[in-house]
Amino acid sequence: MVRRVDSTGKDAKNTRTPPDQKVDIVSTETLCAAADFARQCQGLGCGTILADPPWQFSNRTGKMAPEHKRLNRYATLTLDEIKTIPVGEACTEQSHLYLWVPNALLQEGLDVMTAWGFQYKTNLVWHKVRKDGGPDGRGVGFYFRNTTELVLFGVRGKLRTLEPGRTQVNIIKSRKREHSRKPDE
C-alpha cells in the first residue's frame, strides 16, 4: 500500500500499485518523511515515481517560504531532508523519476535526483494559463513573473519511455488551481 498525500497533507485513498505503474508521492509533509516513505514503499519495486517534495527556500528578505506566516500552507523540508528520502530503495533497477521543482530551485532538484540514484535526461514544462489561454501573470519571482514550473525527468538504468511517450511534447498548458496543486495531465 502507498499512502497518497495531497498538497494539504490530507490522506487520499490507499491503493496498491503494480511495479510497472506510477506511484504518487505528492508533497511529503513531515520531517519523518524518509522513514514514512521507506515504511510505505518497502518492497514495492516501483517502476515510476512522481514526486513533489515540499521545497524550502528563502526570499530576498531572508524569510522562509512558505513558512512565512502569510504563506503558512504546509510544512517544508530542507534540501538535505529531501535528499534523505530513500526513493531509490523503493524503485526497481530500471525506473523513471518525474520530480516537480520550482524554477528557482533547479540546481537543488538536480542534486536531489542524483541523491535518489537517478540520472537527469530532460524536463517537462508546465505553462500556467488563464481561462482564456493567456499566461497567468500572477506568478511570483524576483527576476521574472514565473508562469511555469518544471518536472525533471530522470532515469535509473537504461529504461526508455513507452513508444507513445516519445511523441509527447514537453509542455503542459493548463490552468493554475489551488496553491501547489499540479495539473492532472
Image: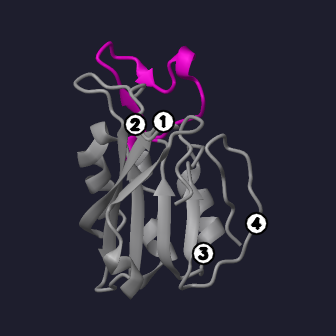
- Of discs 4 and 3, which sits in the foreground? 4
Percent of width and height locating residue 30: 60, 43
Which residue does the image show at 56% across and 34% down from the upper left? 179
Q: CA distance from mark 3 to mark 2?
A: 44 Å
**Magenta highlight range:** 55-79
The structure residue drawn at horizontal position 25% and vertical position 66%, both measured from the top left corner, is: 120
Q: Compute the Cα span from label 4 to label 3.
A: 15 Å
Q: Is residue 115 visible?
A: no
Residue 42 marker: 3
Compute the Cα span from label 4 to label 2. 37 Å
| Secondary structure mostly taken by the magenta-highlighted segment of the chain | loop
Return the disc, 1 or 3, that comes first in the chain's sequence.
3
Amino acid type, callout 2: Gly
Answer few, some or many: residues within 10 Å of disc 1's Cα (few below 14, many 20 plus, some between 14 and 19): some
Mark 1 or mark 3: which is in front? 1
Residue 108 at x, y percent in the picture: 29, 47
- Relative to residue 160, is residue 78 depicted above or below? above
Q: Which mark is residue 130?
A: 1
Q: Which residue is mark 2?
A: 134
Per the image, is 76 magenta? yes
Between discs 4 and 3, the one toward the N terminus: 4
Query: Mark 4 = which residue?
Result: 14
Residue at point 60%, 29% (across, down): 73
SS class of the residue under badge 3?
Answer: loop
Q: Amino acid at mark 3?
A: Gln
Label 4 or label 2, whichever lies nearer to me, is 2
Which amino acid, by three-letter code, is at mark 4?
Answer: Asn
Label 4: state its secondary structure: loop
